[in-house]
Amino acid sequence: MALLELDGVDARYGRVQVLHGVSLSVADEEVVAVLGGNGAGKTTTLRAISGLVAQSGEIRFGDQRIGGSAPERVARLGIAHVPEGRGIFGELSVRDNLRLGAYLRRKGFAESYERVRGYFPWLEQRGEQQAGTLSGGEQQMLALARALMARPRLLLLDEPSLGLAPIVVRELFRIVGELNEREGLAVLVVEQNAKLALRSSSRAYVLETGRVAIEGPSGELAENESVRKAYLGY
Amino acid sequence: MTEFAQQVVAGLASGSIYATLALAIVIIYRSTGVVNFAQGELATFTTFIAWTLVEHGVGYWGAFALTVLIAFGGGVALERVVVRPVERGPVLTVVILTIGLFIMLGGLSNWIWKAEVRSFPPNRPFPTSTWDLGGVAISKQDVGILGVTLGLVLLLYLLFQHTKIGLALRAAALNPAASRLVGVRVGWMLALGWGLAAAIGAVAGLFTAAASPPLDPNMMRPILIYAFAAAVLGGLESPVGAIIGGLTVGVLLNLVVTYDSHVHLELDRLRLPIAFLVILTVLLVRPGGLLGRVAVRRV
Amino acid sequence: MSRLAAARGAATALALVVAVAAIFLAPRWVSDIKLAQMGVYFIALLGLNIVTGYTGQISLGHSAFMAIGGYTTAILVVDHGVRDLWTIPLAGLVAGVAGFLVGLPALRLSGLYLALVTFGLAVAMPDLLRWDKLESVAKGGQAIQLFNSPALTGKGFENVDLLGHSVTFTRAVHYLTWAVALVLVVVAWLLLRGAPGRAFRAVRDSEVAATSSGVNIAAYKTLAFAISAAYAGIAGSLLVIAVAFADPQSFPAKLSLTLLVGVVVAGLGSLWGVLAGAAFIQFLPDLAVHVSKAQGVPDTVYGAALILIVLVLPTGVAGGLHRVLAPLATRLYTRS
């Protein structure tokens, strides 16, 4: 049974329908990419999973139905969502941001922090710094660290490379890969940078105007020239 | 000189009450971004509940504690039932809602309890006797009120800065969407903010009834304006600012009387206009107040 | 002419006829004074609608402008013997200037802060009027009696000669108020239909977009304040003429809140609902008395009504009307 499964999911903003019968799945410990151009509905897919947008259709996480659940409940079940724009608390300190990441952990802050610190050692010194004053790349790292504090089973990453220098993006994806290998963290990553996303994932879906246009193993999609030209722009 | 000192002391006394209500206003603003125009009337309403309890034989301190709890519950209920449907929309809609509450609660207080003369038992919550300090009379009640107010600020500071739920409260106000993603139940955090504010408001109401009897349905109307001035002066986001603001406004209004005896401008009649001037000046000159952050709005 | 425009024109003409008829017929069922008071509210709401509904600047201070207008009339009539009718535009002018002066600093204050400041103004005004230092002008809080003043039409109790008919003072006041109201409706309609109206709406919807389109935001926002204050001033003037006295108690802060209720009931940003809003705030206390004669009942109902409307019908009567009429308008529109 897949860890995450979407079955014929529609999603709408007000009267505008953005997703039309999207079906996808993520298996345990898998890294899956969702690709497509602007307005394809990639971000909306993640928001539908997190309960941030009105949707219909089935969404299952493990054996739980989460379609239409409140974001708080989705988080409680073990899904961590790093939204577009990072979703950190700019006015709070780095440490407070991490504390909030561990909000749902009963064991509290210290234990989660130990683990996360290993991946982001520089966070230690910046504890009291106001999160909004970090650089773009650091903020993205912080957002990722905060998501990890909750010890999730599935990580939703929305456009992590947006606005970041290539070297930072590579580092980010390296860490994600490490998390996947060492912790067995499943990842669903939405990306515009198709090349990088395909290299870092095992399977991918390409969305077009709210529908799944193509899906398959990342390696195959990357090598298929017509697919690349038609859907991925390179 | 003793006249001056006396006025300052009296100003600190009335100022602590303004500060307490200002604290309630700041809590709601900090948790929800809304200025609750009904804060004063809510305080009046809960104070009348306390009086009713005492009338039915409950001891003063028992009634005090019970009232604070009822106020807390009432605040939570108000937020969940009345404010929740509109809290996702523009802030101004919620403000208009609080104005509706202001009007309604004021009407209810008058309707249920009517404008009869009534007061709490004497020497409650604190004895009204005074100490003499170098010719200046300092009322034990005033000291008690000031002490409780400072204690409240300390408790709130500890809550906001050093507890998990305090952090969640702050986060919910700063970024509700991101808060939900980490599992914070934003709706309940907002309700908690209202509950805390209502409870603090209840304390302010009880103090007002003690400091200036008798208890009447309109007693908090002017206090609301002074509290607004205090909150704005201190910075709408800062509990400590609310205290500083409240004490400052209290002392300022009292010193105006002293000054007036020299210039004969009959300024003592102008307490409310002076409070208005404070609000206007602060918002024009330094919108963040003494201790708040300045939110820049440029077009 | 398109069908839609023709239909609109016909509807407006019909509305005008109905309005004039209503003005003459209504006194059969409702007292003149109450009708005049409703007219006063109507005018004040017209103005408040412009500043709050159209440019989105929430003002809780319009009772202060009503006070300024009302006291201008009182002082001119009693101290200077100016005929009451001539004081009406003067009251509007003085209040308008005051509105302009308030509108200037208001530019720097956004929604919530503006509400706070204007509320403070409304609260401060009665005390200001009672100030000893203004006693020579404002009589220190005692009522300024216009009753019996020669400059007051009918001196407050005599019958008035109106185009050959003799009508009671109260009836004359009723006609006067609604005649002024009609004129002001036309003025408002012309304003809102033209460039200022478009600019107002642009400001409300998005200040940033408006600025980048070259709209002088500051000028229009201040203009809106001035106009609405002038309206309020005229309303205050008519109120003072109607009751034949002026005192600080006539213009409490609560009046500003009552006006807010009216504007929310009306529906922000439309002229149509304003009539309903004025009727609501004028006649609700009378209806509330049926529930209980106790003090505080009207307020309870006002407050509850405001809350209900915000929750259930946020666009007010105008919005409701719009929802009902919109399909009709669409049909008319698409056919032509």
Image (cartoon, rainbow, N blue to C red):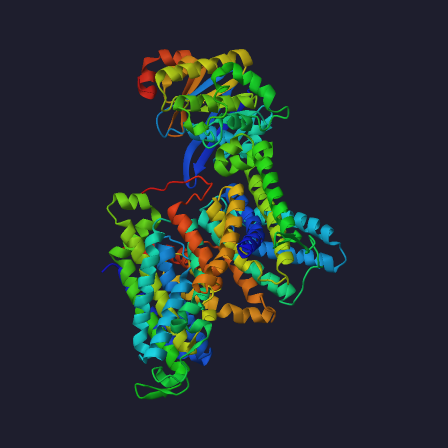
The one nearer the camera, A37 or B298, is B298
C64 w.r.t. B26: above or below: below
Quarter of the rendering containing residue B51: bottom right
User: Residue B247 appears at what percent x and percent y?
Assistant: 53, 49
User: Residue A194 appears at what percent x and percent y?
Assistant: 37, 18
Figure quadrant of the C terminus of chain C? bottom left
Q: Is residue C158 visible?
A: yes
Quarter of the rendering containing residue A173: top left
The one nearer the camera, B102 or C273, is B102
User: Residue B218 appears at what percent x and percent y?
Assistant: 57, 62
On screen, residue B296 versus residue C3, left or right, reads right
Figure quadrant of the N terminus of chain C? bottom left
Quarter of the rendering containing residue C172: bottom left
The one nearer the camera, B275 or B197, is B275
User: Residue B141 appears at what percent x and percent y?
Assistant: 65, 53
Point 31% across, 55% down: residue: C222
